Image (tube, rainbow, N blue to C red):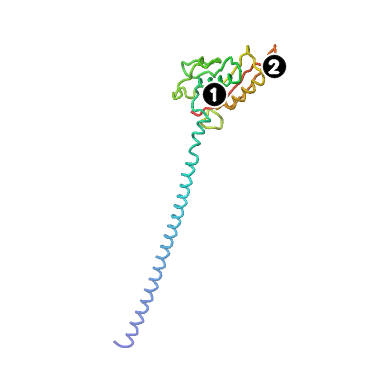
Amino acid sequence: MSAKRLYYVLVGGLVLLAVALVAGAYGTNSLLANESHTLTTLKAKDQALAQEQVSLAKAKQDIKQYASLKQITQAIVPEDKNQAEAVREIVNIADANNVSLAAVNFPASSLGNTTTGSTATSTPAATTPAPAPNAKTGALSQLLPVKNISGVYELPITVQGDPKQPVRYDKFVSFLTALEHNRRTAQVSNISLTPSTDNPNLLSFTLNLNEYIKP
């Protein structure tokens, strides 16, 4: 082989080697870029998972911290419209404050063959019990939905004082305060007072109460 031909062979080899080096460098750079993108994506996913773990741990702590709220809510708002129990509590409050009652009335029932209204005198035993709290047909009878509070209903109750045994004003105020602290009769929506003609210091009354229920 002549020196000139050997020269061309070596030059060609060097050119091919340079092309191979450039192609290798480009391929290596593309591979490194892909691996870098994959690594960045995995790091982002790892950070997201870490944040989710922190949120989950906090949620578990919150569940433990506020687990008693359900029991507190149930203790504050009754789950049934037990009329007999409501009347018994009202009568006991009246007796404790030396207030005589003539009647405790409930709204008309929407059930087919039930009584059009429930009335109880100052003796709890005289009350006509409401339908079973778990009966689907009677669970919401006589109840009105509370505006802007989903799942909560109100049962209007009318309490009439005994006009034959009017009460002193201070006794009436004590009776009213006790009703407002009772969980079944926490809201007094209307009060009607009638002074006695024989003694202006005595009065008879009619109260409209709202019992709140979350069945």
* Marks 2 and 1 close (CB-CB < 8 Å): no
At x 37% / y 78%, what residue is drawn? Answer: 15
**Crowdedness of circle 1 by 10 Å Cα count: few (<14), some, many (20+)?**
many
Q: Please indicate whether residue 27 sits to the left or right of residue 192 in the image.
A: left
Q: Position of residue 152 (x, y in %)?
A: 52, 30
Q: Which one is in front in this view, the residue at disc 2 or the one at disc 1?
A: 2
Looking at marks 2 and 1 on the same chain, the residue that comes earlier in the sequence is marked by 1
Disc 2 to disc 1, how far (Cα)? Answer: 32 Å
Q: Which residue is disc 2 drawn over?
A: 201
Q: In this view, does 196 lie above or below 80?
A: above
Q: Where is residue 122 in the image (x, y as percent from the top left)?
A: 56, 15
Where is the N terminus found, in terms of image quarters? bottom left
At x 57% / y 15%, what residue is drawn? Answer: 103
- Res 19 label: none
Q: Which residue is disc 1 drawn over?
A: 155
At x 52% / y 24%, what residue is drawn? Answer: 143
In this rendering, the count of numbered labels is 2
At x 32% / y 85%, what residue is drawn? Answer: 6
Q: What element carries label 1?
A: strand
Q: Is mark 2 on a helix, strand or loop?
A: loop
Q: Nearer the viewer, residue 48 or 208?
A: 208
Q: Position of residue 213 (x, y in %)?
A: 52, 27
